[in-house]
Amino acid sequence: RTRVTAVKGRCLNLLTNGPFCFRRVNRDCLIIITQQSRFVNTFFHFFENIFSGCFFLIIKPDCVLGLATGDTPIGMYNELVAKYEAGEIDFSAVRSINLDEYYPISPDNDQSYRYFMNKHLFDRVNIDKANTRVPDGTAENVREFCSAYEAHLDALGGTDVQVLGIGRNGHIGFNEPADEFTAGTYKVKLTDSTIEANKIYFDHEEDVPRYAITMGVESIINAKEIILIAEGKAKAQAIHDMIKGEISPSCPASILQKHDNVHIFIDKDAASLL
Ligand code: PGA
C-alpha cells in the first residue's frame, strides 16, 4: 500500500474502501493518488514541479503533453512560462495534443481552444507550433478528422502526462455524462449544464457552440500518467462522484478509478463533499 503520512480524517475510510489514497500538501491543497502509483515517493518529492508539468520536461524533454483548457489550468500554464523564462525548462522538443475544441469554431475566435492555448502557453514558450495539436473546429469532414486525430495520438505513442480539468457534471474533455464510456476522438453534443457553465465566456448564450470535438474517455485514460486539477465548490459534487461513486459513464471522470497513476490536485472547496 502506498505510504500516506498525512490524511484528512474523513478521508481515511477511502484508504480502506476505495482505490485512492490521500495526502494533504498544505492547508489549501489535497493530493489524491491511486494506491498503485509507481512514482509516489518521487512524486511527493517533486510535487511542485510535477504540478506545473516541469518534472516531465526535465526528465523527458521530448515528452508528449496532453493538454487541457479552461480556467483551472491557467495557473499551471503561467507557472510553466515562468520556469521557461527562468531558463529551467525547454519546450523545443515537446509534442502536445489537446483534449478538445468547440465545433464549429474558427481558431481565430478568441473563445476557441486553439486561441486559448496560443495565448496561455504556445506563444509564450519555444514550442514548435507544428508539434502542437488542437482539434480543428473548422474540419469539414469531422469523421475523417477524428480518425486522423486518433491516428496522430497513436503515432505519438500516447501522452506521457495528460492534464485534466473536470466539469461540474463530471465531464473530462467534453465527454459528457452518457450511457456508455466513449472510445476514440469524436464529435459530441454539449449538455445544457456545459453550455450554461461556458456561456460566461461568450457575449450571448446562443453564441456558445452546441458541439465539440473531443478525445474519448478511452483515449484519455491511455495516458501513462494523469494530473486532474479542480478548484471551488462548484466542482465538489463531481469530485465526490469521481472518487466515491461507482465507475459509471454518468460521471465520466469516475473512469480514473481504473487508472493506476493519477494525481488529483484539489482545493478545500472542491474536496468539501469527500
Ligand atoms: P474549468 O473547466 O477549468 O473552466 O472549470 C474545466 C472543465 O470543464 O473541464
Image: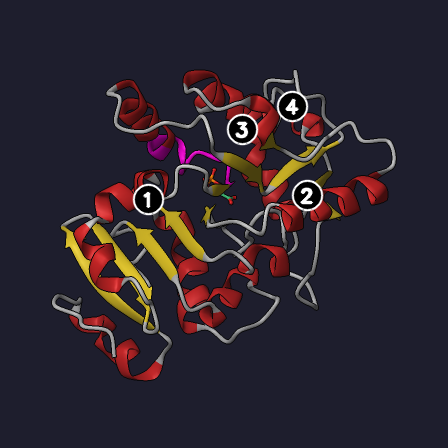
Question: Disc 4 on helix, strand or loop?
Answer: loop
Question: Disc 2 on helix, strand or loop?
Answer: helix
Label 2 sits on residue? 152
What amino acid type is highlighted by mark number 1? Ile
From the viewer's perspective, is residue 106 above or below residue 181?
above
What amino acid type is highlighted by mark number 2? His
From the viewer's perspective, is residue 219 above or below residue 88?
below
Q: What is the quadrant of residue 152 in the picture? A: top right
Q: Nearer the viewer, mark 3 or mark 1?
A: 1
Residue 23 can be seen, yes or no: yes
Q: Is residue 203 left or right of residue 150?
A: left
Which residue shows up at 58% across the image and 47% down it? Answer: 173
Q: Is residue 131 left or right of residue 260?
A: right
Which residue shows up at 45% across the image and 65% down it? Answer: 242
Cα–Cα span, label 1 and label 4: 45 Å
Label 4 sits on residue? 204
Task: Estimate how packed mark 4 is, as few (under 14), some (14 to 19) or many (20 or more) residues with alpha carbons within 10 Å.
Answer: few
Residue 269 x, y percent position in the rendering: 29, 51
Label 1 sits on residue? 59
Q: What is the quadrant of residue 72 in the picture? A: top left
Cα–Cα span, label 1 and label 2: 23 Å
Cα–Cα span, label 3 and label 1: 39 Å
Residue 15 x, y percent position in the rendering: 27, 78
Which residue shows up at 46% across the image and 58% down it? Answer: 238
